[in-house]
Every structure is written in C-alpha cells, then in structure tokens.
Image (cartoon, grey):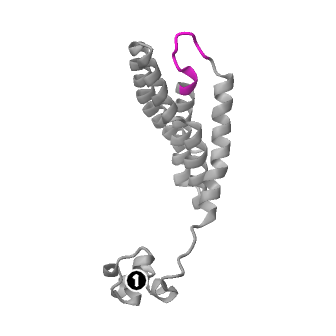
Amino acid sequence: MGPAAAALAVAGRGVGSCAGAIRRINGCDNAMRRGAGSIRPPRTLPILAVAAGGVIGSTGRVLAAEVGPHPASGWPVTTLAVNLIGAFLLGAYLARRQRAVTGPWSLQMWAIGALGSFTTFSGFSLEVVQLLEAGRSGIAAWYVAASMIGGLAAAIAGDAAGSRRL
C-alpha cells in the first residue's frame, strides 16, 4: 500500500472512493495532502450540545421521579408520564425544526441530549421486568401497551401540534 492509499485508509475513506470528480467531492485530495499522521480530532460543539442537553433532560427526569406519584399498585405512573411527555415534545420539536432555521447543534442538544435523557427506555424496561418478577404480569402487560401505543399517539399529536402555523 502506497503512502496515498495509507493516508486514505487512515482518514476513513476507501481507495476506491477517490477517483476523478468524486475525489474532489469527498475531500480525498485534502486527506492525501494531510498525510496519515494528521487525523482531525472530533468537533467539540456536537459533544457539548449533547452534554448540555443531557444536563437539562436528566435533571428534569430526576425532578419528575422525586415529585411524581408512586402508587402502591406498582403502576409506574411517573415513568409513563415522562415518556409520553417526551414523545410529544420530540414530535413537536421535529415538526417545528423542519420549518425553522437552526444550527446543527440544535438537534443534538434538544432531541438527543435533553429529550433523550429525559425519557427513559431503560427505566421502562427495568420496571417491566420488576413487575413480571413480582408476579404482576397484568400490570406489566398494560404498562407495555400504554407505553407503546401512548408513545406513538403522543409523538403523532406532538407532530400535529408542531406542524401548526403560529
């Protein structure tokens, strides 16, 4: 393998992707000029955007868990409410984002960071397992159905709400 092919392999581009006009479009010329030892570090803005959103969403999730109801029946009301609210907000955000001029960090901060950490599929899964282990399969089945059907309905409602002209 020659030096140019090695530079392309290190830059994450195959040799076959650097022919003619494609080479200029894919930036292979720059990859070859930089050489194998000059791989760029990841951009920090997307990482910081997700982290900032994560602080917002996870804080909201913890607050909801603290103030939310904890019924004796074992029904995970708070997690269900948080996930349905998050699905609605994500649907609304994505619908609004299609019409708005935002930077690429906006999706990373709000959809991935804030709403991704606010909602909790892992918490939902754990609660289903705990309900099954406690012999409450009926509640577990209703919880799964309410979460899946309700989540889809909330996302559709959020999309409809976000699509309205203000």
Tell which of 72 and 119 is nearer to you.
Answer: 72
Q: Position of residue 48 (x, y in %)?
A: 65, 57
Question: Is residue 165 depicted above or below 146 in this figure?
Answer: below
The quarter of the image holding the N terminus is: bottom left
| Image location of residue 85, percent across then percent down | 56, 32
The C terminus - image quarter: top right
| Residue 78 among magenta residues | yes
Q: In the rendering, at what x and y percent does residue 129 appear?
A: 43, 24
Residue 63, quarter of the rendered image: top right
Residue 69 lies left or right of residue 146; in this view the side is right
Q: Position of residue 58 (x, y in %)?
A: 64, 39
Would you say the magenta stretch is mainly helix, strand or loop?
loop
Residue at the extreme left of the image, as rendered: 16
Q: Nearer the viewer, residue 88 or 127?
A: 127
Q: Which residue is mark 1?
A: 6
Q: Nearer the viewer, residue 18 or 102?
A: 18
Neighbours of disc 1 within 10 Å: few (<14), some (14-19), many (20+): some
Q: Which residues are magenta?
A: 70-79
Residue type (three-letter) at the residue carrying disc 1: Ala
SS category of the residue bearing label 1:
helix
* Whether residue 97 can be seen here: yes
